[in-house]
Amino acid sequence: MRAEVTIRFADDLLMFLPAARREPVRRVPYDGTSSLGHIVESLGVPLTEAGPMTLRGARVEPSLRLSDGDEVEVAAVPRPQAVPLEPGREVPRFLLDVHFGTLARRMRLLGLDTAYDNDMDDPALVVQANAERRVLLTQDRGLLRRRALWCGAFVRGSLPDDQLRDMLDRFAPRLRPWTRCTACNGVLVATDKASVADVLEPGTRRGYDVYGRCADCGRVYWPGAHSARLEEIVRGAVRQVAAARRGTEGD
């Protein structure tokens, strides 16, 4: 008789399984040599999305070699997810794939260090994510399964509003709204009116005295440039992260 193992997936991971076989319990043939992580990914779930794995109630690693008849429970990544940070850094940095231009601008609006280029292939994304220790956000499951990638996450949702909520729910990062350039990700530096007067419309010069300028691209910002929609995005994000952090502290 051939060897067989059972994998029990948390409900939150079922979306990664093939639609025709989207059941929480999967019995699969086992060759005796493949690691647990390899089996999980072969069923469609990137390891970046798999949380704690347990065998007979004990925590096991993805590198584990199973035995015939073993049953493993695979949970989803706990939320909010803790990301390894470099010394001196309090907030994770992010890198978005080419399909997330709007999400990138919204994350920068919230003050998150967010790299984005609409013309990068998969190998280049992995190289940049690793070199700069950025969390790669994508909906490309194959990209998340690349062994070289140090940290990545699948972003759920087809609309930018849903994608932003999912990202905030997963990481609950500390926000600093209105501190980054939404165009290039540079840091905004306070500047006086005289130094930017030549790029302002007359009405703007008369109406505002407080300005910020991107240290990288030179783009100028002022309070009146904030539309009601942007204000709404910021308020909603701040509330969501605050609630997530209160929940974590309560645990």
Image: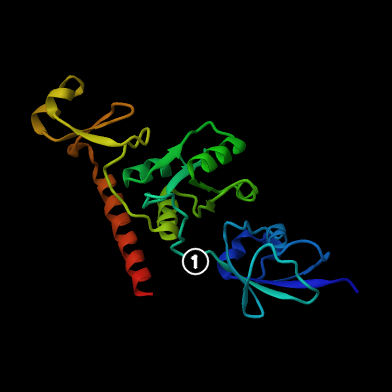
| Quarter location, residue 106 | top left
Residue at label 1? 78
Is 73 situated left or right of 219 in this image?
right
Residue 97 seen in this snapshot: no
Residue reaching furthest to the top: 198
Rendered-image quadrant of the N terminus: bottom right
Mark 1 crowd level (few <14, some 14–19, many ≥20, 10 Å Cα): few
Which of these two is toward me, 180 or 128? 128
Count of numbered labels shown in the rendering: 1
| Quarter location, residue 29 | bottom right
Residue reaching furthest to the right: 1
Residue in the image at 41% along x and 42% along y = 114
In percent of width and height, residue 73 lies at 64, 73
Residue 173 seen in this snapshot: yes
- Tag 1: residue type? Pro
Residue reaching furthest to the bottom: 56
| Quarter location, residue 104 | top left
Residue reaching furthest to the front: 87
In percent of width and height, residue 243 lies at 32, 65
Which of these two is toward me, 161 or 28? 28
Which of these two is toward me, 38 or 105? 38
In percent of width and height, residue 246 lies at 32, 68
Residue in the image at 37% along x and 55% along y = 173
In percent of width and height, residue 119 lies at 53, 31
237 up-or-down from 189: above or below: below
Is 49 situated left or right of 217 in this image?
right
130 up-or-down from 207: above or below: below
2 up-or-down from 97: above or below: below
Rendered-image quadrant of the C terminus: bottom left
